[in-house]
Amino acid sequence: MFPENSSKYWSRDLETMNHVDRAELILKRLRHLLKYAYQNSLYYHKLFEEIKIDIDSIRNLEDFSTKVPVTTKAIIRREQHEHPPFGRIICGSDIAFIMASSGTTGKPTYIPFSKQELDRFAEHHARIMWSFGIRPRMGILIAAMFTMYAGAWGVFLGSNRLDLKIHPVGAGSPGATANAVRTAQDLKPEVLYGTPSFILHLIEQVQKIGLNPPKDLGFKIVFGSGEPGFSLQPIKKKIKSCLGEDVKVIDTGSMVEAMPWMTNAECEFESGMHLWQDIVYTELVDTQDMSLVSFGEEGVLTYTSLDRITYPLIRYYSGDVSYWVDDPCGCGRTYPRLPKGIYGRIDDMIVIKGVKTWPSVIQEILEKSPYYNGEFRIVLGEKESREYLKLVVEITEESMKMIQRDGSASDKIVEDLRRAIKNGLGVSAEIELAKPFSLERALHKSKRVIDERTISSELAKLRLHGDG
């Protein structure tokens, strides 16, 4: 069953609820979740006993924010290391689907879900997709990897619930872009989903082959997740200028730990991500004391999924940075919003070609190489609107002597390093060799990342006190 196609809302009562009633609804569900986790999760049972949480004393959302500690990636990783495979957070064995999130060590953390949860996620994602104009029997091109990556599967669940015609063309493999363009030409789906990077690359290819996108492709709605970008007005403008000025460009997404991940999402008014609080209760907290920040202030998004009981993550500290407002939106929904999306992280995460990594992971890979001399630089750049990753790697004196004796040794070193990075990260990198001790050493904290991408300068403008 669906609402009437002309209806703006999947559930008007929930989506336009006043703040007092919504707070009461959320509090009721949070208290139920806390009691369930205490009774069924060894980790949360022990935690609540140690810090002496009286769940009955949590009488409002402020109590929840001040009395319940955050859950971090480090906690999940430690739990899964010490109590494999899922740690003691897990509440049951009714597991139907497992997704994963990578971490600073490169080893994934696993997040399991039950069949009942997947059904609820499908309902929630359908409801959110409805808010930015998707309607039953539309066609959707899912240009994202169907691996343990949450994005593609989350879109698939919502699309299936909405009874869409689904075209799962994938991404990241040889020929994927050409296949996506050909499928769009042949089948004319109204909706396109992918990471911002892939969609921008797809647009570039469309322009190269001389298509008329509004006529030859016919997309009406483009939405993405997995990295910042679609909340940026220059990116929206670039996509609309190619695909058509009336195309909706929608920013969505949180992370697999906050599943259902689509609960940060713009509506058809494209005025910032709504936080669908009755599905995933989202707080923005201070980076130092974890206290709730006021509307208009910047903080780290912290998620509590209200429909997750197999693997509940209570107040999950995401590390994603934004600022929030509680201003009215033209759609009439009364959720808080992230007017400029998610635009940064508190750490030094790098996103290249939709893949997330960190300098420490790259360093760990390089340290295993006999050619590596202890210093490197990461250059993130663009060539013809396509992102690339370049590593400037300082080599040892012995490696330098090898090159001096035989110039072809340089090619072997570059290829060995390139292969190591590809195997370790899953992303190709250009390699530039630097002479021994030619790169400056840091006396305090290393600053190895040089980001020359256009999107980086746009994201920098989105800082609260910036000019963007």
Image (spheres, grey):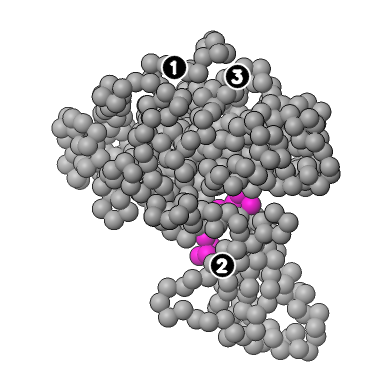
Q: The disc labelled 3 sits on which kind of residue? A: Arg
Residue topped by disc 2:
450
Task: Measure the alpha-carbon separation of dots 2 and 1.
Answer: 46 Å
Observer-nearest of 354 and 189: 189
Observer-nearest of 134 and 111: 134
What residue sits 59% from the left and 84% below the top? 438
The reply to whether dot 2 and dot 3 touch (C-beta < 8 Å) is: no
| Sequence-first disc among 2 and 3 | 3
| Left or right of 288 in this view: 369 | right
Task: Measure the alpha-carbon separation of dots 1 and 3.
Answer: 14 Å
Residue topped by disc 1:
11
| Left or right of 189 in this view: 281 | left
| Left or right of 336 in this view: 399 | right
What residue sits 51% from the left and 53% below the top? 459
Q: Position of residue 51 (x, y in %)?
A: 19, 45
The magenta region covers: 353-361
